[in-house]
Every structure is written in C-alpha cells, then in structure tokens.
Image (tube, coloured by chain):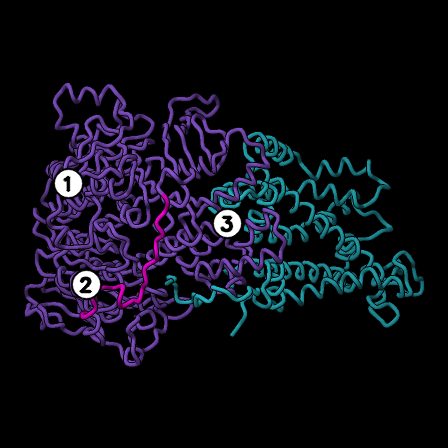
Amino acid sequence: MAVPMTETAASPARTSSPITPPKGATGRGRLVRRRFRRNTFGMVSGVVLILLFVGAFVSPWFYPFDYRQQDDLFLLTPPSPTHWFGTSKLGEDLFAQTMRGLQKSLVIGLLVAALSTGLAAVVGAAAGYFGKATDRSLMWVVDLLLVLPSFLVVAILSPLFRGGSWLLLVLLLGLFSWMITARIVRGMTLSLREREFVKAARFMGMPAWQIILKHLLPNMASLLIIDATVNVGAAILAETSLSFFGFGIQPPDVSLGTLIASGTESALTFPWLFLFPAGLLVLTVLAVNFLGDGLRDALDPTSTRSRRRG
Amino acid sequence: MVDRATGRSDGNAVLAVRDLAVSFPSESGRIDAVRGLDLDIAAGEVLGVVGESGSGKSVTALATMGLLPPQARVTGSIRFRDTELLGRTDSELSAIRGRHIAMVFQDPLSALTPIFTVGDQIAEALLIHDRALSTAAAAKRAVELLDVVGIPQAARRAQAFPHEFSGGMRQRAVIAMAIANEPDLIIADEPTTALDVTVQAQVLDVLATAKKLTGAAIMMITHDLGVVAGFADRVAVMYAGRTVETGPVDAIFETPGMPYTLGLLGSIPRLDRAQREPLVPIEGHPPSMVDLAPGCPFAPRCPLAVTRCRTNEPDLEPLGDAGHDAACWRTAEVRNAKAATDVFDIVAVEHHTLEARSERPVVLAVDDLVKHYPVTSGTLLRRRVGTVYAVDGISFDIREGEVLGLVGESGCGKSTTLLEILAMDRPQAGSVQVLGRDVAGMDRRSRRALRRDLQVVFQDPIASLDPRMPVGDVIAEPLRVHGFSADQARARVTELLGLVGLRPEHVDRYPAEFSGGQRQRIGIARALALEPRVLVLDEPVSALDVSIQAGVVNLLDELRERLGLAYLFVAHDLSVVRHIADRVAVMYLGRIVEIGDVDAVFERPQHPYTQALISAIPIPDPHRERTRERILLTGDLPSPVDPPSGCRFRSRCPLFAELTEDLAQVCIDTDPPRRPARRAPESGRTDDSDHEAACHHARVR
C-alpha cells in the first residue's frame, strides 16, 4: 500500500496503534495566546495597561487627598512628597485629579472603542454576508448616521442626560463612530464571502453566525484591531472636546481631557499641570497601540514576528 | 558541452546561452533563479523547455529578452547570432526585440493594451521597426497577419479591442504580432496554459503555421510534456535553475537519463492507456533557491540518490546517443530502468471488483437539473434582458463506490452544476437526490444531517483553507459543526492526518506553511472528516504541478478503494479523468452531450465534440503525437446567453459542416436527445449499454 507522500509526510504507521493526539495539540485560541506571549512589546503594554487601571482605581483608597479637596496651604506647588504631582491653582491635588481623570478616560476610551468596533464588525459582516434586504436596510442606517453631524447631535442631546450616568456618554460616542468601519467591513466581507473556505464551511452545514464569527471576522482582525486602537485615542479626545464645550464630564468631576485642557494655558509656567495628565494620556494610547500590534501579529499567521525563533 | 556532443557549431545556433546566472535580492537572501545555464537553439528548430514552477524557465526567457527587473544580477553570455545580448542598453535591445526575437506571453489579455485596437497594435509592431512603412501599408499588413493566424473576417476584427476577443483569439493576435517582422526566434512562454484544450490545439496549430511561414526557431516554455512531445524537436528539462537533461525529443521520452525526467514522464496520467498504472509522484518540492545546499539539487527527492549526489553537483555530460546530455551521476541506473514505477518504488493500488453497476445503490442522482441566471440591465429599474443558460437540463447518477468524471471546457456549466448540487436547495427545475432522498422538500435539520454524506474538495488549495486557522482546527471544523466533542474531534484529526499522509504534529501549523500538494491533502482530510459517502471534487489537481498532482491523484484513488467512496470528479483535464474515473460525462454549453463508461467513451467516442476534445489532448509520446489525426474545432465556445438553436454544438461541429442539407436541417431544428450509443460493428461488447450520446448523427470515427 504505497501512500504518495510529500517530503514531510508521515510514514504509514497508521494501521493499528491507538491514536493518541500529539502532546500540546492546540486549537486556535491557545495557539494565538502562545504567539502573543512571545511578543515582548505586546506583553509589556498589556502589563502597563493593567498597572494604569490598578493605579487609577486603587490609589484613591490610600492616597490622602481627594480630587475635590482643596489644600489652601499649597497653591500651584510643584511635585513634592506630599503632593506627588503638585497642586493646581485652587490647591487641588493633581495626582488625585489625574487618577480620577484616568479612571474616566480609560473606561470611556476602551468601552467606546469596543462598542464602536464591535458594532461595525457585526453590522458590516451581516450586511455583507446576508446581502439583499439586510444589506440595504443596514447600509441605509449607516448612510443616515454618516450624514448627521454627530458632534451637534451629542451636544444637543446631552442636556437630556444631564445628571445621568456618564455611561450614556460612552453610548453616544460609540453610536456615532462605527459607520465608516462598518462600510469597510462590509466590503471585505463581500470579497471573503466568495472565497472557497467560506463556501466549504457553508457546505458542511455551519450556521451563518458561526461562519461570521469563525471565518469572516478573524480574517479581518488586522483591520478591526487597528480600528479599535485608533478609536481608543479618538474617544478620549472626543470626550475632551465635548467636555471642553461643557457637554461631557462636568466639574468638579474631571477627565484626562479636562485636565489637559485646563493645564494647557500654564504648560510653560507650571508644566506639571500639563505634563502629568498629557503624559498619562500618551502612555495609555501607546500601550493600547502596542497591545493591538501584538494581538494582530499573534492572529496573523504570515507575520514572522510571533514565530518561534530558532 | 552541448556543441561537443552534437557536433553543432556555434555559427549555426540562432541563440546560444552560456553559463547564464540570474539572481534576485529577497528578504531571506539572494535567490539564485538561474545557475549556470547552457542552451542552444538552431535556426528553424523548436526547443521545448520543461520544468516545474520555480525552475527558472521564465527567468531565462526574460533574460534573453532583456526584460528582467533592474535589481536582477545577470552574468554569463547570451549570444543571438553574432550579437552578445547581455550588457546591452535597453534602447539597443529594443532594435532586436520584436524584430529578430519575438515573445508570446502566457496571459494574452495583459500582453495586449486594452485601449488600442488589435489592428493598431500589430501595425505598431511593424512601424516601430520599419520607419519607411506607411501607416496604410502597416494596417493592411496587420489584416493579412490576422488572416494568417486564422482570425475570421480579419479586416473587421482588426478594428476590435482586445476585450472583444476571446482568450484564444487574443493569443492568435499576440502570435500575429510576434511574427509581424519575420523574427529569427520566437520565445513562447506557456502560450497555451491559460487556454482550454480545444483552443490550445488551435493555438499550437497557428504556432506551427507561423513557424512554417517565417522559418523562425521557437523556444517553447511549458510545463506540459504532452505539448512538447508533439511540437518540439529538442527538449531541455530544467530543475532548480539548471538544465538537467537535454536532447532530441524522442530520446528524452524513450530513454531519459535523469531520474527527474523519468519521474516527470511517469507522473502524467495518459489519455491513451486504459489500464490503471499508478502515477509517479516525485516526493517533496523544488528546493528553495536561497542558499542551495551542495550536491545535486534533486537529490533530496531522488530515489536513486547516493552519497556522491549529496556532495557534488553533476555537470551535463553526453550520454552516448547523439545530442543527448544529462546531469546525473547515476544515468546508467536510470536508463536501465524499465519504468518510472520501478525506480520510484510505487506499488499499484489494488482495485476491488465492484458488483455490477445495476446492483449497487444510487448515491447521487441528478435529474434534468436547470440553473438559469438572469441578465439584467439598467441601474434604477432593473430589466431582464436575457438569460444565461448555465445548466440546462442535465441528468446523471452515481452509484456506490464509483467515480463519475464531469468534463468540459470552461464556461460549459460544470462548476454551476456542482454548486447547485452542494447548495441542496430546491432547484429551478429538475431534482437532485442524495442517497435516494430528494433535497428539495427537506427541512433545515435533515438537510444538515444529509450534508455529512456529501462533502466537497475545492480546486484552489490556497483559497479553500482559512489562512487564519491552524490545520487542526480546519480539519476539526466539520466535526465540531456536527456536534462532536473537542476530544473526539482531536482524535479523529490525528487519524485523518495519517490517512492523507501528513504528520500528527502538523495540527498546530497554519495553512501558509504547507506546499500546494499538502494543502490539497488537508482539504481532502477535511472533506473526509465526517465519513461521507459521496465526495464532490472540483478540479482538485488542476492548480498543482504535475509531479505533485500525481501524488494527490494516487491518494484519491487509494482513498476511494479503502473507504468505498463515490466521487463526482469535475475536471477539464481528460487525462486525469481517464486515469481515475469509472464513468465520464462530457458537458457542452449546459448539457451533457455524451456519458458512459470511461473506456467506451475514450475509445469509441460517438459525439463529434467528445471526439474533438479527446483528439486535442496532447499525449506525452512523440511517435504517437506525430501520427495522430487532430480534429480542430473552429471558433470558441458560444455564449451561454445565446446558444445556437437545435443542437448547441452545431456552430463548431466538424460533422455538421459535412452533412447534406436535409440532414443538417435536423441539427438546426431539433435539439438532439441523449440516445444509447450505436455500438461499433466490430465490437461485440455489451457492457456499454449505458453509453449515451446526444447527437443526431452520432457515429464512431
């Protein structure tokens, strides 16, 4: 029984012997995780993000100053062991404020990014894969949202939500930032749908939503990840500009955006007011980007960076 | 060396290539695409250059034409008559290109400029090299040339744009351009690879005419040994950037001196052989051309390799018979071998004899299946302006354990038929029955359950596997969809990998890390995961190199024996079908024109289309090729939007042209039904009772 074999083919030792799966046989999930772990930048960024989260949410518990508290003895003092990041002109502790702001900005940034990229992926893939009426109605919604001036709508609607949770702000920001990506996703789905591996999945009886989740979206992962990382930064900045006009986070509450906005005026004279919040914003966005890069390389089998070396 | 062996002097050679080396920079190092190549082409001679993809054939052609990209490093010598071509500037070469050396490319669509008419482009080729020629004279000559290459109504067609031409006509136009200045050498790089067999036969015929008219030598680059056998005077076999064997065509085909040539010859399924000899797959794949290991580059794949082969690379040495050289340390052993199967140690798959066909249950039955597509125009208000009769009433059945080959040219509706069967929806008309159950009235659950028994292997081994899924997950996918647990799936995946000749540790790799043949094996493993009864194969080997193709064909043959599968095997390559199928159905414009036992159909074809199709397939045997009578079809496949009335084949039918008027009228008026074939008077056989042909005047030629 000669089995035609290519160079790497196994010897035909398949006649008997109980079949034992090779050790460490993995599925896609574990393989991707393993590949991600080899990416130093990605891992470091993940750790940095976790530290930022921990810092932002845990430090208020033991730090002696509250972000609203005004220390009349220390007005505009530079960083010192008492006030780690210095104080503002009203004597508010900048470290407490920055951590409070970081809480808001991290949550808003990540949630908005997840929401808008997720929405874009689902809507775009569904429109592209199902076509016909689904496609037409979903794309109609996309076009409608695209022509509405989102900033104005959010500005007009925000008084309605005044006093409501800032989560509503997340929802609004998310709802107005997914449309262009959804259109791109739809276009990619249209071409992926005709590929033979999608047909193969269909002919083996796989339900449509599983095809979308298992085949279509992973093949667009690079696009989606880049989109999400860009969205994190964009959402933080959008929140800042909304807040600047008095629609988003309102004093005495703070976000990184409002802190930067108020610190900019005195960036040269009292640099700590500007440098600390801005530095943390840059750190956050950088960490998210490197994390995204690492994830993209881990998911992309053609990337050589996550291969095992040697 | 070549000259010493043949006694030919350099002066006689139109083209003499000496020690040519071409390398390109790449991410992983310099790619040595051609490494010390020697070639000679005498005046009026046809040299066939054969080899697998990546062997350096095309790079050699481009180097001769001076068309390599600037980053390529070229050394050695290419002499055309008395002129050294290497080291010339582009403008100096331009005086030679197109005038003395012409080129015919593989893809005729990209070889023509889309925005100029075909006539203008041919005239341009004339005007560039002859300033004295008037525009009117050039246009007139262009029409003459189009006429020479067999384009009907040449004067009118010269005004057409390339997109209005079919593939075959475009290639004719390119040939017309190539012979416009009566060159001394025509380099044809895979000129028929993109074409259907009947069109390939036409184009080869045109090339032969062109050669006769201009007396040009032709360098014919191809991977198809059949084409070479019929067309070339001498052959050069290339492997890893070098000529490994060269000689007169008969000597190469009869007594090859190099294991690679022997393997190549053994790997081609033969149209003219009824008995199933196993094909010879050459294990492994061509070496990467970066940092090639010392020794013969073929040694890792060679069954005869000895230590010497792994340390010293052999040079081309004369073999004794005139002009036949090979680069191998073990030529004696190769030439003593009786057949490739001995050298490559291939054992035939034992074929069980099946019960009589009528005793076996039908596993797939297609009855009068119809699939029409609307042709619409207008953007705002869509109007239906026509219908594509893609599949127009076809019927066949496949019984347990047998292979039905569905053959036909591109556009005949083969793939549409497949997709209709696989979709398992209610057809527009007719019915599809899988394992005796009509798919039309089925609910979602039972349709899904039935899918387990009908699986598919696609043509393109790259597109059919999700690039982002490890191979283990790819193969496990159908199992998971049909409710197997992760552990069960994992055990089965290991088993399947062994079944198709891959290693269990391959589960963690991504498809991109495998070669084309291995990827096709993964696709087969996936299709077999659910233990189906019927496997639908859509051109499963047409995207693979011949030596790799042989391995996959053997695997399919073996699997069918072991697992008792039935195949619906769609292919345009009749040789492969002859090799693997029990029965064959020939499709033309959405209809089956002939169906029956392979031996009956191939040996006594009744329908003129089948006869033409079979005669168009080149056979890798120079003697037989020279004596074969070729039935050339005129024109191309008509558009399925507007098929001819009555018999659809009549517009190209060689028989129709010979008929008397009233006999011909039947063909125009009446669509021929499928009728049992008339048995050849001399054969007393009764077994081709299910051999049917759809022709009013069917007869054995």
Same chain check for tags 3 and 2: yes
Q: In front here: A292 or B240?
A: B240
**Kind of element beneath mark 3:** loop
Q: In front here: B192 or B589?
A: B589
Identify which amino acid the numbered label 3 is placed on: Glu
Give the dominant element type of the magenta stretch: helix, strand or loop. Answer: loop
Residue highlighted by disc 3? B531
Percent position (x, y) of residue B377? Answer: 41, 24
Residue highlighted by disc 2? B236
Q: Kindly report which numbered mark, 1 or 3, lies closer to the viewer in this rendering.
A: 3
* For residue B303, above or below residue B41: below
The cyan one among the chains is: A
Q: Which mark is residue B149?
A: 1
Identify which amino acid the numbered label 2 is placed on: Ala
With A130 as the anchor, is A91 left or right in this view? Answer: right
Nearest to N terminus: mark 2 or mark 1: 1
Identify which amino acid the numbered label 1 is placed on: Val
* For residue B698, above or below residue A13: above
Cα separation, mark 3 vs mark 2, equals: 45 Å
Percent position (x, y) of residue B96? Answer: 15, 56
Q: Find the magenta span and give its range.
A: B335-355
- Residue at left offset 8%, top offset 48%: B212
Percent position (x, y) of residue B540? Answer: 38, 49
Q: Kindly report which numbered mark, 3 or 2, lies closer to the viewer in this rendering.
A: 3
* Residue B79 visible: no
Q: Quadrant of residue A75?
A: bottom right
